[in-house]
Amino acid sequence: MQYVKNKLKSFAFCSLLAAGVTGPVLSQSLSTGRAARQKTPTVQEEARRIAEEVADRFIADTHFDFIQVPQKPVLGMEVIDFRHLSFEDHEVAYARGHAAAPAADTVRFGLSSPGRITVWLNKKIVYRQQERNITNPKEIAYSIFSFDTTFSCAVKAGDNEILIKYEAGAAAGSPLVFLRALAADGMADPAVSFHTGGTVFPGWQYLGPLPDDPFHSPEQGAVQAYYTVSGKMCNWQAAPLQLLPELRVDSTAVYQRDPYADWHYSHGTAVWSIMALDAGNPEGKYRRFGEEYCRFTLDNKPYFQWQYDSLYAFRGSYHRIFRRTMLDDTGAPGLPFAALYKSSRDSDLRALADSIVHYIYDRQVRLSDRTFCRPEPVPYTVWADDLFMSVPYLVQMAKATGEKKYFDDAAEQAVRFRKYLWNPETGLYKHGWFAYTGNQSVAHWGRANGWIAWATAELLEELPVSHPRYKEILKMFREHMASLVKYQGASGLWRQLLDKPDSYEETSCTAMFTLAIARGVRNGWLSGKYRRKALLGWEGVCKNIAPGGIVHGICRGTEIGMDEQFYRDRKTIDNDPRGLGAVITAGIEISALK
């Protein structure tokens, strides 16, 4: 109850300030005597306390330990793994599996394997290859993999039996076959479901190794229960069950979808924001939490690298740190590591931080003018989100290393993202831009604008005033803020679709706009008249924070939608980390307002 009373006092305080009430009237409204004034927290004190409460909940829901879970196929990727069979050159082994299709169709499969292999579907040969040197499939975009080859074949409605013969040879590579049914967009084809044969062991069954005796091999007629080949007896067997360590999510955690200790852009952003609660205080508990978070990741990274590369746990813990196919996997998750390296100069932190900045600067996909882009939902798409996924990290590393080129790249990205995403009619940014059409996407999504606002505020805070792009970026920031305040609701909250009053009020974008405006006022980038807008925004955020640091109204992760209804239909999730860092940082900025 005291929490609610304090929040109501804070709301009242914010409302009076937002309305322009000052002097004796404000003093009389808040207290009637010295004792009462001492009991009423200032808006700054209350903002700091609420930010700490949200941070404390995140910390309580973060666990640095593992549970063992059976490994299962993911993303429609079948890993036919013969490594548990002791192969010698020119010995053969077989794998048998099943796939179901709702209707007869022609299906394209992606395949990678170093061995001499033959694939039968329903007792007909559909693919054959000689041995070759290959690389394992690599995830090149969300759930899209590269393969060494593809082939197409007809499947029948219902159950389809797949048989694969593998012969070891001189080619380099482990005895593996990667197989995946592919849709036109490169994703897994949902029309084909593996492991549906109705057997006791629904996964792949293995036979061998055997001398290559074609007269007694299992493709001749019906599959038998066991075989005798050249005096050697062999029966079908299941592969050993792998138990993978996965980060634990406690049943009491508010957010159940992912463990906060995992590598993810939203988790890294939240931890980085939590650490800022102890800015300048290396002994503070929030910085210590950030150190524990980073050290736990570094200590366990070698094992999980092996798990990703050798057990093919494409969605196991920490998989994103090894996938590294986009800025989501690199810049924002690495923010607490870069911040700690900047102050501690720890060599382990530097090794990770350097590898991330080299990916961003040298390897990230770009347009011809070097604007960051993604291969999804179509190749060369510019996402507003990516300004935040890159620029704050580049700024951190520019400060940490003294490399001016990182400042230059960050500044150029801010200017170019405006070129592609800014809508001069509304003064807002669109969520995306498509190279193949030259057009922007449909929506002024709230959090897309929030990522732009927050990234620009981080850039302005650190970019030298003498930088040739500084004045242009400051002008861009001011124009964006001037447009945003026109769309702020009476509640203080902004909406999921900023220019659509019938879309729902959303917390994460409100927190991002609040922190950007408050920081702008604090640094003199914006006039004092914006102060009341920041306070009103914070009041709106606080309305969605329940006791115990539980934040409501955060839109879940969101792709670029092709129509506005897509954004209206996105669910909100309590304590989704995609908004927690912004809420904490907004509290910090409000607490610093004078």
Image: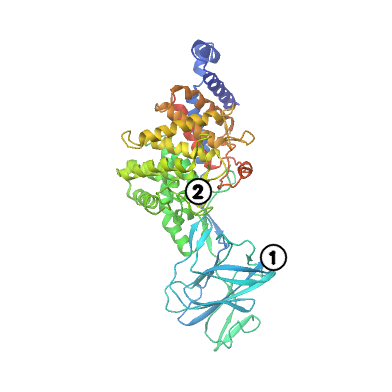
Residue at the left extreme? Answer: 402
Q: How crowded is mark 2: few (under 14 residues within 10 Å), some or many (20 or more)?
A: few
Residue at 57% across / 31% down in the picture? Answer: 493
Left or right position of 416 against 259: left
Residue located beneath label 2 in the image: 438
Q: Quadrant of the C terminus?
A: top left
Which residue type carries mark 1?
Pro
Residue at 64% across / 63% down in the picture? Answer: 191
Residues 205 and 190: in front is: 190
Q: Is residue 482 above or below residue 29?
A: below
Q: Examine the rendering and report whether any part of residue 499 can be seen.
A: yes
Residue at 32% across / 43% down in the picture? Answer: 400
Which label number is shown at residue 357?
Answer: none
Q: Examine the rendering and report whether any part of residue 515 can be seen.
A: no
Q: In this view, does 188 lie above or below 404?
A: below
Sequence-first tag of 1 and 2: 1
> Real-space Cα distance between discs 1 and 2?
38 Å
Image quadrant where residue 291 sits: top left
Is label 1 in a helix, a strand or a loop?
loop
Q: Quadrant of the N terminus?
A: top right
In contact (CB < 8 Å): disc 1 and disc 2: no
Mark toward the viewer: 1 or 2: 2
Query: Residue 513: where, in percent of width, then height?
Result: 50, 33
Query: Residue 156: where, in percent of width, then height?
Result: 68, 71
Which residue type carries mark 2?
Gly
Residue at 59% across / 87% down in the picture? Answer: 216
Query: Residue 317: where, in percent of width, then height?
Result: 50, 54
Q: How crowded is mark 1: few (under 14 residues within 10 Å), some or many (20 or more)?
A: some
Residue located beneath label 1 in the image: 102
